[in-house]
Image (tube, helix red, strand yellow):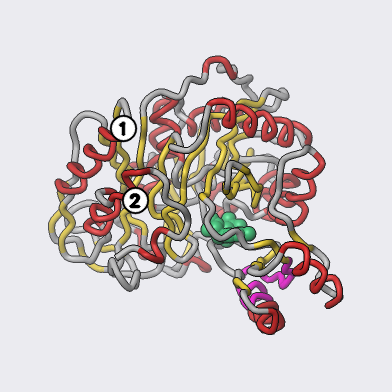
Amino acid sequence: MFKKILIANRGEIALRVLRACRELGIKTVAIHSEADETAMHVRMADESICVGPASAQSSYLNIPAIITAATLTNVDGIHPGYGFLSENQRFAEIIEEHNIKFIGPHSNHIKIMGNKIDAKKIMDENNVPTVPGLNDISDIKNIKNFIKNVKLPIIVKAASGGGGKGMRVVSKSDEIENAINSAKAEAKKSFNDDKVYLEKFLTTPKHIEIQILSDAHGNVITLGERDCSIQRKHQKLIEESPSELLSNEKRKEISDLCKKAVSSIGYEGVGTLEFLYEDDNFYFMEMNTRLQVEHPVTEMVTGIDLVKEQILAASGEKLKISQSDIQIKGHSIECRINAEHPESFIPSPGKITQYHQPGGLGVRVDSAVYQGYSVPPHYDSMIGKLITYADNRKECIARMNRALEEYIIMGINTNIQLHQKIIMSEEFKSGKYDINFMSTFN
Ligand code: ADP
């Protein structure tokens, strides 16, 4: 078992990992930038170490500084959280070379799944349904044939894509060249890889993803699904589990296929297979080889602490839970609380002058902010997650509405009221919304 873990992240997820470590009796090391000296994750860790100036590039993405910090503090594991270096194959590889355990999959699996084209190939081989696509776009004839087969609209996507970047929807055939070129340029800038591919653009799908957990001994289980269709700019805003649309049979069918696919490569740890779901059909999009922001809704409906399980699996322990232990019970919703203007989505950093977070039965707040804290302008605008749990979806929505009402954050703009408007809308209440929800919501 690990003795000391370095948490290569900040904010609520650094705190989330720290809490799991504490319950497991593992010491923690926080890293931080110069801008995060007073951050909660730094205050709560057993040790902390500054890894560079404010910009993420110079600190939370600074591999040599983080490895130096890990060596100096003598840790035996590094947890990357999500974002930053969590899906950086080179980071995982360097950690392995230093005989420290990367708390995540083998670097090779990050590489395979980090390339969406390769990931889709593995899914195809295991009969997991994928979105119809075209990988080789060097020949215009192939592109024309593809469009003839699947019909417009199509979407250009970056092979190394993430965070909604490097994507362009094409509705007219004369737009294709421009779309490819601009997606390539954005992909190059964001991921240093300009490889793009084409997919049929599904017009009214839901985004549904399957959580998996596996160990180093070949055991793989799935923990149900999350519906993450409420998105803005292709980024998730609200997630829930279970999905209103999925029958037990459908859930089992897709979960079994996911299990087979991740087993086929010997994947270890937590992971998520993301799908579009339209007309009762699943279409695999990509796999995230890390803990997801929205993992708490799964924890609430399964009662499983995913971060503890992830750490135990990374330490080489066998999974103690089997598939038959997983019972989806009740309903859970998560609202991402962002420091941003609710309409323009422009980030709103600054000092939190008043803070009061909701509580009571079935309410969970995963956040690292406090009264007097200054939200720095250098990082992601998400400052916390509000999660509610209840016996059923209707009560869960009512509880979320009540919790949002209680949530007071003054001094900066947040999307708390927007969340309230969304969850109280008839479309959200029906559960039948799709990924276009936000584009027509007012
Ligand atoms: P990223 O890794 O950048 O998050 P994803 O492949 O996960 O990219 O896609 C993000 C979102 O973009 C999806 O949840 C969906 O809203 C939209 N999207 C991606 N591919 C398609 C597609 N083929 N058809 C319709 N929407 C898509």
Q: At 26% from the left edge and 31% from the top edge, which residue is drawn?
A: 362
Where are the magenta residues, as a range? Answer: 183-197
Q: Quadrant of the C terminus?
A: bottom left
Q: Give percent across and percent down for residue 176.
A: 69, 79
4 on left or right of 44: right
Q: Is the residue 193 above or below the residue 267 in the image? A: below
Residue 410 showing in the rendered view: yes
Mark 1 is surrounded, within 10 Å at the Cα level, by few (under 14), some (14 to 19) or many (20 or more) other residues, namely many
Among the two numbered marks 1 and 2 on one chain, the one whose residue lies closer to the N terminus: 1
Q: CA distance from mark 1 to mark 2?
A: 20 Å
Q: Considering depth in this image, is 324 or 32 the residue closer to the camera?
A: 324
Q: Which mark is residue 389?
A: 1
Mark 2 is surrounded, within 10 Å at the Cα level, by few (under 14), some (14 to 19) or many (20 or more) other residues, namely some
Q: Is the residue 188 above or below the residue 59 in the image? A: below
Q: Splitting the image into 4 quarters, where does residue 262 fall?
A: top right
Q: Give percent across and percent down for residue 319.
A: 60, 20
User: Disc 1 marks which amino acid?
Assistant: Tyr
Mark toward the viewer: 1 or 2: 2
For ligand 1, tell me if the residue under mark 2 lies within 8 Å. Answer: no
Q: Is the residue 26 above or below the residue 385 in the image? A: above
Residue 21 showing in the rendered view: no
Question: Residue at label 2?
Answer: 427
Q: Is the residue 237 above or below the residue 161 in the image? A: above
